[in-house]
């Protein structure tokens, strides 16, 4: 019985070392595979019931798996949609075959890195056929709130390369100095006009005409101007009419003192903005808060449009896409306009090493991994999302070669045990002679 148990132990030793050799071979073969996670073989002794005075060898068994929590080095690339996670967490993907499926289901898989490029239909996918998943933003570039414990809100990321987009103007910041000398008694009282361009809802350029008219007093200085705003897109209709009084004190001279609304448009002293109803909708014109040294001012005898800035842009064509550290995928147009179109979450599970390994460095949830949760990149336990980057293989070739030598020696030793048992059994047979 003892001799036969030794034989069985030697056989199990051969089997487990063969399994370990297979994992080492896989690791070395994938030492240059992006996102590859090492296959590991763990040995566990088998113990059988022992009777007094004898010992029976139980042998050994092996369990294999993936060291998914071990990370490879990140390297930079020249593709903005080469993505990797800097730390814990994985990217959500789905097989490209599921998109064309009649069922409409998109099963979620996970990967730590991928080189995503748009295919003929615009889907961002890897060469291995994995399509990136994300939460779509609305037309205003805002990502709604989606449930974090289900894939229901995720959809395949699709980019329309022929997409045109216009961005309507909603905010204008106005920096203009008005000549104080024009509000003195005896001045000409001539109006000053300036034109502001804004962009409508269809990307068209429209004009606002601002007319500054000084209030000329009979004596002294009024320090007052009327500001009238007309919208050419509405046939020159008055959309803003205000009387602005400027401060003449030593501390706040030249800044806005008060603003009076004259029936068209509103003024908010908290934000310092005129609000007018242009053809495209409400536009806020920031002229400054009372006693604030910016926006409209009245100093000296010079009219000077110091600075005029605005948001919005004319119709433009998609130029590129990029992903930031928080997972927001933005479309960048050739006029410089940028709009968020997707948010890429980072998937995390309690036990990453319990995930079920699938081809193309992808994984799916199993009973051992625990349930997944979709985090914002860089939030909670997960790392940032990195564009222009790939994760290298987690294989250390030097370590694998060392283990290869150890495995070869262990295999030879187990074979020697079997050979020795065979010789002992032969001696036992020879006793009868």
Image (cartoon, helix red, strand yellow):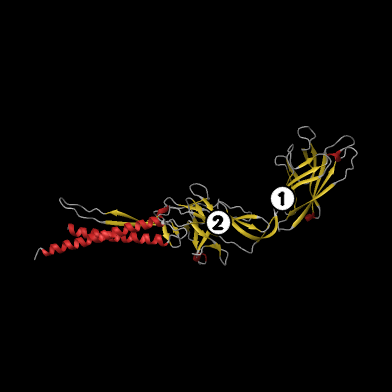
- Spot occupied by residue 49 in the image (x, y as percentages of width and height): 21, 52
* Residue sitting at x 25%, y 61%: 415
Q: Could you say which is closer to the camera, residue 41 or residue 411? A: 411
* Residue sitting at x 73%, y 58%: 204
- Name the image quarter holding residue 339: bottom right
Residue 257 as seen in the image, left or right of residue 159 = right
Residue 158 as seen in the image, left or right of residue 422 = right
Q: Could you say which is closer to the camera, residue 226 or residue 339? A: 339
For the C terminus, give its image quadrant. bottom left
For the N terminus, give its image quadrant. bottom left
Answer above or below: position of 18 versus 219: below
Residue 63 as seen in the image, left or right of residue 112 = left
Q: Earlier in the sequence, mark 2 or mark 1?
A: 1
**Can you identify the residue that label 2 sits on?**
388
Visible residue check, residue 198: yes
* Residue sitting at x 10%, y 63%: 431
- Spot occupied by residue 247 in the image (x, y as percentages of width and height): 79, 35
Visible residue check, residue 16: no
- Graded by Cα atoms within 10 Å as few (under 14), some (14 to 19) or many (20 or more), the crowding at tag 2 reads some
- Spot occupied by residue 197 in the image (x, y as percentages of width and height): 76, 53
Q: Secondary structure at mark 1?
A: strand
- Graded by Cα atoms within 10 Å as few (under 14), some (14 to 19) or many (20 or more), the crowding at tag 1 reads some
Report the disc number at residue 310: 1
- Spot occupied by residue 74 in the image (x, y as percentages of width and height): 50, 54
Q: In the current view of this chain or complex, which residue is farthest to the top? A: 250
């Amino acid at each position: 019985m003892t001799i036969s148990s030794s034989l069985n132990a030697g056989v199990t030793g051969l089997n487990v070392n063969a399994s370990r050799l297979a994992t080492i071979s896989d690791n070395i073969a994938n030492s240059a595979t992006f996102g590859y996670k090492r296959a590991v073989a763990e040995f566990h002794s088998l113990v059988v019931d022992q009777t007094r005075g004898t010992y029976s060898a139980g042998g050994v068994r092996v369990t294999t798996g993936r060291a998914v929590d071990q990370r490879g080095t990140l390297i930079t690339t020249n593709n903005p949609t080469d993505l990797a996670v800097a730390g814990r967490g994985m990217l959500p993907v789905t097989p490209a075959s599921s998109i064309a499926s009649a069922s409409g289901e998109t099963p979620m898989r996970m990967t730590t890195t991928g080189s995503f490029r748009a295919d003929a239909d615009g889907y961002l996918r890897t060469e291995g056929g994995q399509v990136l998943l994300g939460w779509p933003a609305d037309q205003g570039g805002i990502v709604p709130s989606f449930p974090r414990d289900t894939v229901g809100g995720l959809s395949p990321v699709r980019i329309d390369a022929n997409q045109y987009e216009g961005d309507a103007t909603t905010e204008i910041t106005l920096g203009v100095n008005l000549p104080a000398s024009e509000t003195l008694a005896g001045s000409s009282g001539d109006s000053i006009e300036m034109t502001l361009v804004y962009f409508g809802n269809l990307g068209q350029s429209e004009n606002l005409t601002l007319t500054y008219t000084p209030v000329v007093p009979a004596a002294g200085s009024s320090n007052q101007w009327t500001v009238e705003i007309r919208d050419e897109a509405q046939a020159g209709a008055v959309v803003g009419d205000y009387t602005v009084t400027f401060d003449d004190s030593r501390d706040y001279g030249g800044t806005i003192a008060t603003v009076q609304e004259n029936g068209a448009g509103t003024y908010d002293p908290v934000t310092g903005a005129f609000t007018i109803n242009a053809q495209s909708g409400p536009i806020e014109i920031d002229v400054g808060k009372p006693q604030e040294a910016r926006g409209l001012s009245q100093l000296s005898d010079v009219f000077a449009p110091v600075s005029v800035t605005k948001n919005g842009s004319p119709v433009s064509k998609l130029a590129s896409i990029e992903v930031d550290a928080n997972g927001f995928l933005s479309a960048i147009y050739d006029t410089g306009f940028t709009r968020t179109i997707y948010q890429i979450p980072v998937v995390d599970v309690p036990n990453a090493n319990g995930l079920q390994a699938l081809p193309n460095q992808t994984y799916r949830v199993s009973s051992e991994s625990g349930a997944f949760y979709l985090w914002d990149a860089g939030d909670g336990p997960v790392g940032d999302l990195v564009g222009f980057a790939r994760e290298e293989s987690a294989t250390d070739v030097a370590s694998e070669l060392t283990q290869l030598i150890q495995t070869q020696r262990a295999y030879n030793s187990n074979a020697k045990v079997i050979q020795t048992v065979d010789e002992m059994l032969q001696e036992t047979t020879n006793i009868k002679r």
